[in-house]
Amino acid sequence: MGQLGWIFAVFSAIGFSFKAILVKLAYRHGVDAETLLALRMSFSLPFFLVMGWRARNVESPLAGRDWAALFGLGLLGYYLASYLDFLGLRYITAALERLILFLYPTLVIVLSAVFLRKPVTRRIGIALALCYAGIGLAVTHDLQVAGDRSVVALGCLLVFGSAVSYALYLMGNGEVVVRLGAARVTAVASSFACLLSIGQFLVLRPAHWLVSQPPAVHGLALAMAVFATVLPVWLLAEAIRRIGAGPVALTSNLGPVGTMLLGWLLLGEAIGGSQILGATLVIGGVLVMARR
């Protein structure tokens, strides 16, 4: 069971890292962020509804405050974070996007210090310095290969906003998960995010755009829903059940490396020395932060 748990954790990390690659490939066919996100969520919604039905608890039905909390989590953690991420991927490489998103544990620390008055230890301070120095090096690499530096800056800000949104989601979901269970929280919050994404599309774009996209876009959106959304979520939950959250968290360090390699292989993104060193510093900082 332990070996299977490690396999699940590794494939979950690879699945999440593959999302940025699929988004960048879809953009080559002229689709916009709102339409692509709506397609991804439309394909994902049936899976999450089934997951929610299986995780239902007849003996403890959801109260009004539970529905409100789950809507808020879906808004922050799955809808807003995904939308900002999709927008940012228009302007920066997949490798840089994954590194910026990987900062979310540091943002949880910083936000907790600011709003919850939690102290920042010397070790955490060193970890923060490593992470943000690494991001600075990775951004320098993208600025060197980009034609318009303001575009890179905009992409970084959008993806950083995505990381902030996800960090706020993590800060808010702890008590809700304890009360309602991880599977039910994930399924219901994700379903709300799907509905929000589809609703946003219907407000901003003609409805027929969903079906009029090229077959390649539909195929990439379906792959994104199955292999980079639903399946990694399930594998992550199963891995945590088998080997625990600590070991699973360590495997998440494969994400930035996997995205960098996949971006080089499938997108032709350049890999420079500053980018490799930056990724090493970010991963090292997160590992220092996670050490007991």
Image (spheres, grey):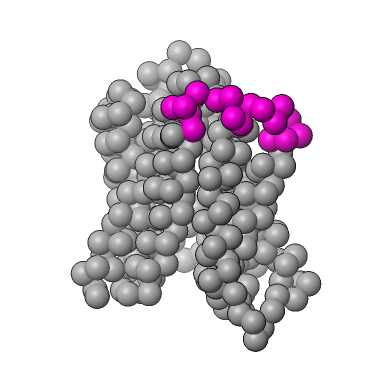
Residue 212 falls within the magenta-colored stretch: yes
**176 lies above or below 190:** below
- Residue 20 appears in which quarter of the rendering? top left
Q: Name the outermost residue toward the bottom.
A: 59
By secondary structure, the bulk of the magenta-drawn segment is best described as helix
Q: Which residue ends up furthest to the left in the rendered image?
A: 3
Query: Horizontal and vertical percent for residue 259?
Result: 34, 39
Expressed as whole percent of the image width and height from the top left, the position of residue 38 reads 61, 39
Depth check, front residue: 178 or 172? 178
| Percent x, y of residue 246 | 35, 70
Between 76 and 163, the residue placed more toward the observer is 76
For the question of whether residue 288 can be seen, the reply is no
The residue sitting at 78% across, 72% down in the picture is 64
Quadrant that contains the N terminus: bottom left
Extent of the magenta region: 201-218
Q: Quadrant of residue 134?
A: top left
Residue 13 seen in render:
yes
Residue 261 versus residue 278: which sits nearer the camera? 261
- The residue positioned 69% from the left and 35% from the top of the image is 201
Question: Is 122 on the left or on the right of 117, as rendered?
Answer: left
